[in-house]
Image: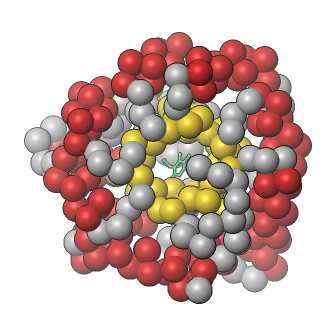
Amino acid sequence: MTPDADTHLRLGVNIDHIATIRQARGTPYPDLEEAVRLVEAAGADIITLHLREDRRHIQDRDVEVLRERIRTGMNLEMAATPEMQGIALRVRPEACCIVPERREELTTEGGLHVLGGETRLRAFCAPLVEAGIEVSLFVEPEPAHLDAARRIGAPVVELHTGAYANAAPGAARDAELARIRSAAAHGRELGLVINAGHGLDYYNVGPVAAIPVLHELNIGHSIVARAIFSGITAAVRDMRAAMDAARA
Ligand code: PXP
């Protein structure tokens, strides 16, 4: 992993919402092992899963089982809690993305409070980095947040693209895109590896994918939603194609 611009923009596929469907009825299906097999065969570069504190989708057992099944790499999203740190140190995923978490939220609604939480986050991340896990902080695309991430000692940041995805097309969305672009450039100057994600879909991914310094996009909801109609293989391939078209 280097922070250098790479023509291959990596695709991390977040499989949480396949587990959401399973948990809705408590059935053994849809089977996450089969999902991982298909998603990897369709071109994912890493499999992302968020073990939430309320276990609303991914379960502890999924993390254990998928650790053995994932061939590309596991990116474990988690809150900065002692419980999650213990799990990560035991399971040793290739990557960990530290996210803020509130039980009442529908999804991860904002970046980490890196500015007020530097000391705590530095202590939280150090053993993970020490264990060889690629630690990433999920942050708002703001220069000050990237400066803080650098001081905390995480080698990677994931820029929260939710405000971009939710902005109305036109001036508002263009402004959010510009914010992501300049945060990515700033992070790169700091020597950080820059990922991005949240709310990206087949229609809004292009301008983000075209930002040359980005290393990886993590995308879940839109891919799982499309899979309902076209199957997970086509849904992953279509996203891959949209990203490649933007980079070409
Ligand atoms: N990146 C992070 C850090 C996230 O928390 C999420 C949502 O779990 C995603 C990416 C993927 O977002 P979406 O499901 O909207 O594609």
Residue pictured at 69% horizontal, 65% vertical? 5
Q: Nearer the viewer, residue 184 or 188?
A: 188
> What is the x, y in percent for residue 74?
39, 42
Residue pictured at 62% horizontal, 39% vertical? 136
Question: If the image is split into quadrants, where does the C terminus sit?
Answer: bottom right
Q: Nearer the viewer, residue 201 or 90?
A: 90
Above or below: residue 246 compared with residue 55: below
Residue pictured at 39% horizontal, 18% vertical? 90
Q: Is residue 111 visible?
A: no
- Report the number of numbered marks: 0
Q: How is the image coloured?
A: secondary structure
> What is the x, y in percent for residue 228?
25, 69
Above or below: residue 44 compared with residue 130: below
44 displayed left or right of 41: right
Q: Nearer the viewer, residue 165 or 10?
A: 10
12 displayed left or right of 157: left
Residue pictured at 47% horizontal, 62% vertical? 11
Q: Which picture quadrant has residue 196?
A: bottom right
Q: Which picture quadrant has residue 60?
A: top left
The outermost residue toward the left is 28
> What is the x, y in percent for residue 31?
16, 48
187 displayed left or right of 137: right
Q: Is residue 215 visible?
A: yes
